[in-house]
Image: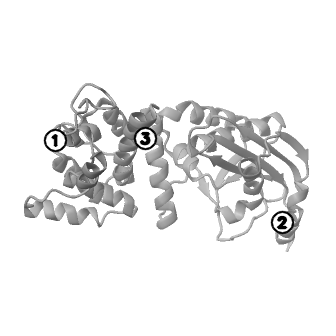
Amino acid sequence: RLLGILQELQQPQPNGIPPIEKNLWKAIWKIRAPPKLKHFLWRVLSGAVPVKERLNSRGLQLDSRCSLCHGHSESICHLLFSCPFAKEVWNRSGVQLPAAGFSSSSVFLNVYHLICVNGRRSHHKQNRIFPWVMWQVWKARNILHFEKTQTSSEMASSKAIEDADAWFDANFCEQSGVEAVGEGGDNSTSWCPPPVGVVKCNVGVSWSGSNLLCGASWIIRNHDGMALLHSRRAFKNVRSKLEAELTSLCWVVESLAALHYTNVIIESNCTHAREALIDPTRFPWFQELTDNFGQLMSSLVPCSVEHVITLRNKVAEEIAISVTRDSRYQSYVALGGPRWLINMLEVEARGAVS
């Protein structure tokens, strides 16, 4: 019987729909988001999300209290917008919220507000992540209800931001316009050497969400492309890609300081960390890591951090991936570059002197 009710709840309400709601439904399919999230928004608006209140209305005898807060009947509107957990996730997300707060009774008004602020190009791009925020709240509810595992509001909001940024990075080319953490200065698609008298430290980061494992690496090369030193390390219990990138960057800068390097160009393709370092206020739950990175960087003056495409960071990425892909957990520092990447290093070195 439960399966039949769940299947029925996946269907929209058959009631007639006013024109303004029809327009809102059309707007859902035009937002920039994966089809899965658009479909979820459609189900939210149509009342086709199997929350306890709806299941009980179909004859199931369930405890109707919210799975997340246990303080209110679990309706779609309460779960996604009014529940204390949902409010914390929204507050951490950076999405522009209604001045008087979300409606406690109208899903339509809440979604209408989110689509409106997302459509105003003058507002912060963080407004675009609202479908991911709603999806993470729903996922957190299901994980707690079915797996008895609590998801923190920090983790839910962080995952929403990371997933949204990753999707936009993969599907749209956008200019940040912020110079605080620079982009590489040319259009090359291969590793570029530093100026004479300066060394370049490329940073690699790999993260496995299934076992919360992070692989980190760095490799230092001179203006001739000669590898001077490289290192690899594994970090356990890393909860997100952003945490992996920030943790790895702090470790890299700490290593460079311990080795007494100055005049360093640090290159990485850590997109999430770049956003957090440009605007730490968007990621207050990672303030300790961003503050630590800034303090460590002060010991390397002169030093710069540049964001490059993955093709210009292949060696460091391969070293880092060896932790999560090949279970190479041994941490070490070694002269030169890794022997198993010697061909790649030689190709990039030849390009440096050509």
Instruction: Determine the image quadrant of residue 349.
Output: bottom right
Q: Is residue 337 left or right of residue 242?
A: right
Q: Which residue is mark 3?
A: 157
Q: Which residue is mark 1?
A: 57
Q: Residue at x 57, y 49 (%)?
A: 274
Residue 127 makes an appearance in the image: no
For the residue labelled by badge 1, is the local secondary structure a helix, a strand or a loop?
helix
Residue 180: assigned label: none
The picture places residue 324, in percent across and down from the top left corner, at 71, 48
| Gap in angstroms between the C-alphas marked 2 and 3 | 38 Å
The picture places residue 28, in percent across and down from the top left corner, at 26, 61
Q: Residue at x 43, y 38 (%)?
A: 143
Q: Residue at x 9, y 61 (%)?
A: 17
Who comes first in sequence, dot 2 or dot 3?
Answer: 3
Q: Is residue 327 left or right of residue 179?
A: right
For the residue labelled by badge 2, is the local secondary structure a helix, a strand or a loop?
helix
Who comes first in sequence, dot 1 or dot 3?
Answer: 1
Nearer to me, 61 or 144: 61
Q: Nearer the viewer, mark 2 or mark 1?
A: 1
